[in-house]
Image (cartoon, helix red, strand yellow):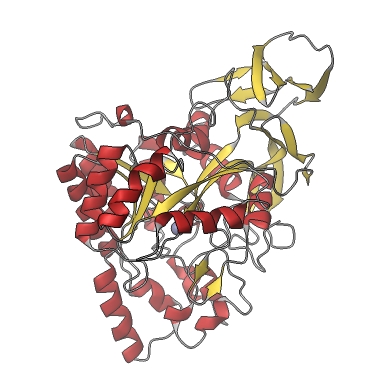
Amino acid sequence: MKKIIKNGTIATAADTYQADILIENEKIAMIGKDLPTEGAEIIDAKGAYIFPGGIDPHTHLDMPFGGTTTKDDYETGTIAAAYGGTTTIIDFCLTEKGVPLKKAIETWHEKANEKAAIDYGFHLMISEINDDVLAELPSIIDNEGISSFKVFMAYKNVFQADDATLYRTLLQAKELGALVMVHAENGDVIDYLTKQALAEGNTDPIYHALTRPPELEGEATGRAAILTEMANGQLYVVHVTCEDAVEKITEARNKGVDIWGETCPQYLVLDQSYLEKPHFEGSKYVWSPPLREKKNQEVLWNALKMGQLQTIGSDQCSFDFKGQKELGREDFTKIPNGGPTIEDRMSILFSEGVMKERITLNQFVDMTSTRAAKLFGLFPKKGTIAVGSDADIVIFDPKVERAISAETHHMAVDYNAFEGMEITGEPVSVLSRGQFVIKDKQFVGEAGKGQFLKRAKYNAALKPDTGKRLPV
Ligand SMILES: [Zn+2]
């Protein structure tokens, strides 16, 4: 069945222009004016932008953490993502020391298989490098189609890997063609500071932020950058929150190190004071790294604008306030880390970024879709509007005004971290490989229709230019 999207304004990472799109066999078949309409379903997109479907490179669905499991699974999580204009997610597959990596990947496939409503890929966590892991890695990339590895520098005694493991992962990834992702916080010092806070009777949510100061994110980011330079490797720093970390990434990029940075909506619009909300409400805002002092928001926006940070991940990792966040009422270290962000990622960036002229429309598309497609081996199948690409398309009304609320969101979780926030713009319809998943703001897709994406190797030609950047 053919479809033609007419009268919309197409925006890609490079251009904004008016044209119609013919969709055939899941792909974009033609772009142009006066396309042959015979036998085609006509979709009128007058007054709307047409974006490539969003790619969220950072989600945690159906993930065990701290004795509980995220509220959103692959079904509710991907449906909420689709409502927000995201048509591809890349989720983190956790691994356990001593357990074959393949086993962990099987477990993640079982979580996703019959539930995902949009396409998805996996990143693979690496917590140790030994002969078994070394033997498995080539086939993880070549056969499983997983070309990005995540290493944690924090969460001591849980996920944290030591520096030698990070370094050896960087070396292996360079050789095999994978991108290493890092959670950059100094886990050892955080462990000491949290124990000290508890010993002094400081148990409130705000101590989550106070025991993970920005200096420890900056320090770990700088350390990871140096190890990347030594390994002549490639690194993607997830959830960058503060000036200390942006400085380290900028410094390394200016030296020509192949390093990329992601930030998340919560760090752009919320700040550390939210952790002080009364009646334990502060627990809703416990992320790691934590929300920072407000002055960091402009630093992050500027870094996005100037290209020092390149992508927006949601870091979706949702827990109910009731019964889950509440596990930490007497002890902030027991509050499950994370929040519900998968649905509002693109709308917040559009409203706060494009509408407030902090970034351009084309930068918005790059940050929410195209760049992630390129870095994670999905381009040009995903991440752009071009002939031959998958017909993953968002028809976006840039004018509608609304307030974000748990009353109207589609995530399974019992609160929204952006409750009451007034924003402009909303996806009206969303197509995944040519099929509507959202039509006129209603979900019309199907759980299980999403396909697993085997991703290509990291493209080393993406490496940043050397030399200092001139101010724009
Ligand atoms: Zn995360």
Q: Which of the pair 268/439 is nearer the observer? A: 439
- The answer, for residue 204, to whether it is visible in the render is no
Q: Which of the pair 91/173 is nearer the observer? A: 173
Residue ranking furthest to the left: 230
Q: Residue at x 46, y 80 (%)?
A: 334
Q: Residue at x 23, y 41 (%)?
A: 233
Provide residue 337's location: percent of width, then percent of height: 47, 69
Q: Residue at x 82, y 22 (%)?
A: 41
Provide residue 296's location: percent of width, then percent of height: 37, 55
Q: What is the quadrant of the N terminus in the image?
A: top right
Report how many numbered discs are placed on residues in the image. 0
Q: Which of the pair 142/277 is nearer the observer? A: 142
- 201 in relation to 154, above or below: below
Provide residue 170's location: percent of width, then percent of height: 25, 47
Residue 234 as seen in the image, left or right of residue 292: left
Provide residue 412's location: percent of width, then percent of height: 68, 63
- The answer, for residue 450, to whether it is visible in the render is yes
- 9 in relation to 412, above or below: above
- 344 in relation to 354, above or below: below
Residue 34 as seen in the image, left or right of residue 459: right
Q: What is the quadrant of the C terminus in the image?
A: top left
